[in-house]
Image (tube, grey):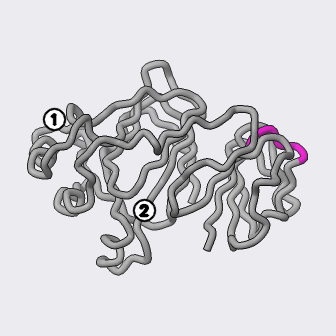
Amino acid sequence: MTKYLFTSEKLSIQVHPNDRQARRLGLPHGKAECWYILDAKPDAVLGLGLKKPVSATKLRTAAILGEIEQLIEWKPAKKGDFYYVPPGTIHAIGPGISAVEIQQNIDVTYRIYDYGRPRGLHLEEAMAAVKLSPYDPKYNPEIPTDESSRIPAGSAFELFQIVGTDDEILPQTGSKEWQVIPLEGSANVRGKLIKAGECGICPQSSDIDFSKNKKSLVACIMP
């Protein structure tokens, strides 16, 4: 599933379960996601992982006392940044960020802290799912700005950056659904023009015409 995020305030601090944890709840799988930053104000930040390993008790207590922000690693956000967020990663998005979020399509999110807003928290579930450690920098690869490339995005889905008409890196078979997210220019998907800010869906990669593309993301799930 693809979302566009435009943040004017801090989003909740949260975590998602992995496959094993989600299946215990009767769900088909857990939830991994990734962020591609479209734009960010100079002071915009993303929360990913912890500054250092802590116990679940300390993390839970900090959430209750409103001190959890001090334990999280806040990273400056800038245009073109990419972050993969594996299940179990404590994460949050600050204000002043425009981003594409691509995630496994499952409705399971455990809120740990929500800045006093009147929404329910899921502290017990979150403590069972969260990784009590720093974010691994391997999940923050540098994406070349001027060439098509496969973007490392874990094993939950495949993600590609396509520049211009250079789409030879796309697999021709395997996935039953392809999502096309133009970043610059446009793409034609089964006869429909898809522009920046939109997302096109089709059953095979050959349904995508990149003749008017400048730069797009393409996501799919491979067997």
Q: CA distance from mark 2 to mark 1?
A: 26 Å
Residue 104, magenta (yes or no): no
Q: Which residue is mark 1?
A: 67
- Quadrant containing the C terminus is bottom right
Q: Secondary structure at mark 2?
A: loop
**Residue at the image position 26 percent from the left and 60 percent from the top:** 129
Left or right of 169 in this view: 61: left
Q: Position of residue 98 (x, y in %)?
A: 54, 35
Q: Residue furthest bottom?
A: 26
Q: Amino acid at mark 1?
A: Glu
Q: In the depicted view, which residue is nearer to us: 112 or 154?
A: 154
Q: Residue 53 is drawn in which quadrant? A: top left
Q: Residue at x 33, y 63 (%)?
A: 17
Above or below — where is 88 with respect to 68? Answer: below
Q: Which of the 4 image quarters holds residue 220? A: bottom right
Give the foreground label among 2 and 1.
2
Compared across the picture, whether 119 is left or right of 64 comes to right
Magenta-span inclusion, residue 213: yes
Q: Residue at x 83, y 46 (%)?
A: 166
Residue indicated by mark 2: 31
Q: Is residue 164 left or right of residue 128?
A: right
| SS majority, magenta | strand
Q: Is residue 138 left or right of residue 130?
A: right
Badge 1 marks a residue whose secondary structure is: loop
Q: What is the count of numbered marks? A: 2
Q: Quadrant of the N terminus?
A: bottom right
Taking 28 as reference, is 111 above or below it?
above
**Viewer-closest of 172 and 58:** 172
**What span is in magenta?**
211-215
Q: Amino acid at mark 2?
A: Lys
Between discs 2 and 1, the one toward the N terminus = 2
Percent of width and height locating residue 70: 21, 31
